[in-house]
Amino acid sequence: MSSIAIPLRSLLQNPSTIKSKHHAKQLHAQVLKTEGSSSSLMATILSIYSHLGFLHESLIIFNTFTSLPTIIAWKSVIRCYTYHGLFKDSLTCFSYMRASGKHPDHNVFPSVLKSCTGLMDFKLGESVHGCIVRLGVDADLYTGNALMNMYSKFQNMDEGFDSRRFSSGNVDLVYEKIPERNFDIKVDIEKDPHPRSLKFLGKNQNQLLVSGGVTPRRRRDMVYIESVKKVFDMMPSKDIVSWNTVIAGYVHNGMCEEALRTVRNIGRANLMPDSFTLSSILPIFAKYVDISRGKEIHGYTLRHGFDSDDFIASSLIDMYAKCTRVDDSLRIFHLLPQLDVISWNSIIAGCVQNGLFDEGLKLFRQMLTAKVKPSSLTFSSIMPACAHLTTLHLGKQLHGYITRNGFDKNVFIASALVDMYAKCGNIRIARSIFDKMDSPDMVSWTAMIMGYALHGHANEALLLFHKMKMENVRPNYVAFVAALTACSHGGLVDEARMLFNCMIEDYGISPGLEHYAAVADLLGRAGKLEEAYEFISKMHIRPTGSVWATLLSSCRVHKNIELAERVGEKVFQIDPENIGAYILMSNIYSSAGRWKEAAKMRVAMKGRGMTKKPACTWIEVKNKIHAFVAGDKSHPYYDRIKEALKVMLEQMERKGYVLNTDDVLHDVEEEQKRNLLCSHSERLAIAFGIISTPSGTTIRVTKNLRVCVDCHTATKFISEIAGREIVMRDVSRFHHFKDGKCSCGDYW
DNA sequence: TCCCTTCAAC
């Protein structure tokens, strides 16, 4: 066997030529047979195993060492642990190595830092950084890259300010990083764990030292991204990985312009952007819906042959979807040779975000058929489709799958479930899921508050909103939308005014369209029409047609034609294609008997080629969706539905129901109006529900537009006569009809 | 040895 000895030596000197486990084992055996088992030889074999990622084999050798392991042995095991994601073991090994008196060399730190990052142990990371500086290996390229990566992940550690985390040690980081110290203001974190709008200057035992200024989170982000930048600037040599790391750091910190500026500088360093660079910056164009610059990058990826890269493809799918070009997303998706869970997630999310709910569900089923295991993100992407389609049975199926696979502890998924149950009309289940959450985050609270708002439980919603603040969860833009929506659906004018001001003054959130719309809607429906008009006129951003249109709808309710005409002018000026406004104006005129003007509106609509979206109501019976449009005679049960409606109408009229024909556009005879109204889609669906479900079952229907005034009244009567609870979801909220009353208190 | 992509509330 002496002929093997020479290749054996050369193999040991060039371990990278060993490519398979089989080959490594062969070499291991040969070494044992011919060369013995000295620790330096075994360390070399160990290093070969670890390079190939064989943890088990590496550990077997490692554990045979009787004397202190060599540095190569330590390094190999540390790297192998990190490679397998066993960060804790990796770091334990690192501390043993240090305790054994061995000085780590530069190529152990990338693994160690990666483990710190993986464990989110930033305190340890910082001390490792100190160790790197002391050992003088901070000029190492790989170490520098890993350091930057670690600091760039720091900002992900939490949302907002959490006193528990601060008192458990991370305060030190902030304390050391702040150059200027101002001990004027002291806040006891036990007493006031949520000091907003204060700048952290340090800590002193149980006290945080702060002064007025930037919010804590912002302050810390700045500290960490500055560390990334500092390491970057100090690195003596940089490769494309260094550039990519600092760019990704900027993107994750929301510093998109800075990221793009850095990309432009890559060329000056005589380097070329690679697939990592591109997949990091594509999300910027997705975020800012910048299709033209996104397309430029797409072109670049094609020219440089990056188009089959999974990462780039997923970014592109996402980018096109966020720019509402979901067709392009689908095209890229279908061209992909390999589909991983992320490409599936991207395309499913893209479809759902663009309202292609059925397509999203179809892709989800295909994903399961393709045996790709869904991740938690898959469920939070697909759940809104169930919420929008009100397909409770599908949502329940998904809920079952989620529970079976242990995803129900995931806060994103739990929030999506809360949202889904609330939007499918089951507010009680939504609440029970919410109550079971260990630490609901702001989104969970918001989903629950919005759920109550949609169901008209305004007080419950506001109670939760205050509870959220008590729990130190800081409301954001959307949370205020939810709270204001609750006020709006509950008619709570004063509370809304207070919230609106509090949002601006205490939270520094500048109101957006949704906030303005909610308040304007509320004022209008409360009859404060002029105040609403003033409020919209004084908006600091340009009101859209739809904001004015909400006021128009209030003008209709309060029968103020004079104001309606002024408001109508505004809408048509800003948004001449606003169909809702034409219909509202036409309704307003026709309910005042001004048929000519009503007709003019309809002619104007037609002239612009606009057609009214047909009203449609659907109901789920025995896991099947039945959809109805007004006057629809195609349903197989049509005759029975018609008969049921006729019987109910007689009973209703005996109880005092009078047809309200205000909503009928057309200048037609009373009898015809009666027929038109009684064949509205919501009535057909409800009647179908009554005749096809056992008595006492709750009836749940969904309408694509707002429920019509007359149908709302009629449904109250029907709920009493049929002894049924009827839950109707329309385009803006839920109505729960029971015993002749509606949960909205007729305020909608 | 180091770097990249997908998600929730409106």
Image (tube, grey):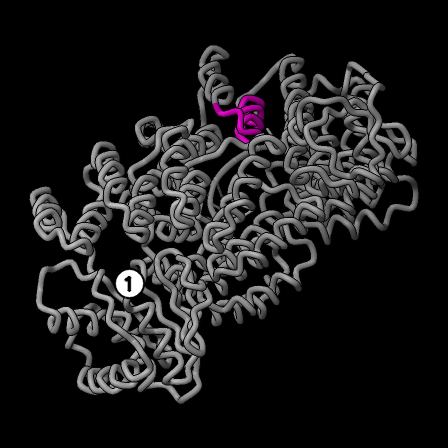
Question: Foreground residue, A21 or A298?
Answer: A298
- Most extreme residue toward the bottom is A694
Q: Nearer the viewer, residue A654 or A477?
A: A654
Of residue A631 and residue A718, the one placed in the foreground of this image is: A718
At 8% from the left and 49% from the top, the residue drawn is A596
The correct choice, above or below, for A567 with respect to A367 in the image is: above
Answer left or right for A465 relative to A108: left
Give percent across and percent down for residue A185: 82, 23
Q: Magenta part mainly helix, strand or loop?
A: helix
- Name the amino acid type tagged 1: Cys
Q: Quadrant of residue A697?
A: bottom left
Q: At 56% from the left edge and 35% from the top edge, which residue is drawn?
A: A501
Percent across and percent down for residue B5 are 48, 40
Q: Magenta segment range?
A: A242-256
User: Badge 1 sits on which subunit?
Assistant: A
Quarter of the figure with residue A150: top right
Which residue occupies 49% across, 25% down?
A256
Q: Residues within 10 Å of mark 1 (few under 14, many from 20)?
A: some
Please name the residue that numbered disc 1 is placed on.
A708
Q: Is residue A3 visible?
A: no
Magenta stretch contains residue A243 = yes
Q: For this view, does A713 lie left or right of residue A91?
A: left
- Report the label total: 1
Whether residue A345 can be seen here: yes
Q: Position of residue A584 (x, y in %)?
A: 23, 50
Asked if A306 appears above or below A685 in the picture, the reply is: above
Q: Is residue A213 above or below residue A342?
A: above
Instruction: Residue at 39%, 57% (x, y): give it.
Output: A748
Q: Position of residue A201 (x, y in %)?
A: 78, 22
Say what secondary structure mark 1 lies in. loop
Residue most extreme to the top: A268
Q: Is residue A62 magenta?
A: no
